Image (cartoon, rainbow, N blue to C red):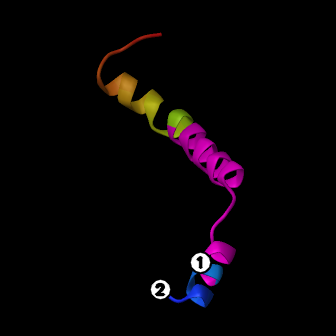
Amino acid sequence: MSPGGVRDLKERLLPLRKQAEITDNWLKIRLHAILPGLMEREGIDM
């Protein structure tokens, strides 16, 4: 990869904190959207 290519790649990547924030938000969505139905389907009560 050329030095300019590395620079371009760095500009397109998000900082680790922002990546973690996006991942955490997706996990929250999955937790609230998928888990209740899955627990009900499997007969797990809380």
The residue carrying pointer 2 sits among few (fewer than 14), some (14 to 19) or many (20 or more) residues within 10 Å by Cα, namely few
Q: Badge 1 is on which residue?
A: 9
**Rendered location of residue 18, percent (x, y):** 70, 53
* Quarter of the view holding residue 5: bottom right
Report the predominant secondary structure element of the magenta stretch. Answer: helix
Q: Give the structural element (helix, strand or loop) at label 1.
A: helix
Whether residue 12 sits left or right of residue 34 in the image: it is right
Q: Considering only vertical position in the picture, is 14 above or below 33?
A: below
Spot the residue most to the front: 3
Q: What is the number of the mark on residue 1?
A: 2
* First of labels 2, 1 by sequence position: 2
8, 40: nearer the viewer: 8
Whether residue 21 sits left or right of residue 5 in the image: it is right
Q: Considering only vertical position in the picture, is 22 above or below 27?
A: below
Q: Residue at 47% x, 85% y: name it.
A: 1
Report if residue 24 lies within the magenta region: yes
The residue carrying pointer 1 sits among few (fewer than 14), some (14 to 19) or many (20 or more) residues within 10 Å by Cα, namely few
Q: Nearer the viewer, mark 2 or mark 1?
A: 2
18, 42: nearer the viewer: 18
Whether residue 26 sits left or right of residue 34 in the image: it is right
Separation (CA) of disc 2 from disc 1: 10 Å
Q: Amino acid at mark 1?
A: Leu
**Rendered location of residue 46, percent (x, y):** 47, 10
Q: Which span of residues is magenta-colored?
A: 8-30
Q: Amino acid at mark 2?
A: Met
* Quarter of the view holding residue 7: bottom right
Q: Residue at 63% x, 45% y: name it.
A: 25
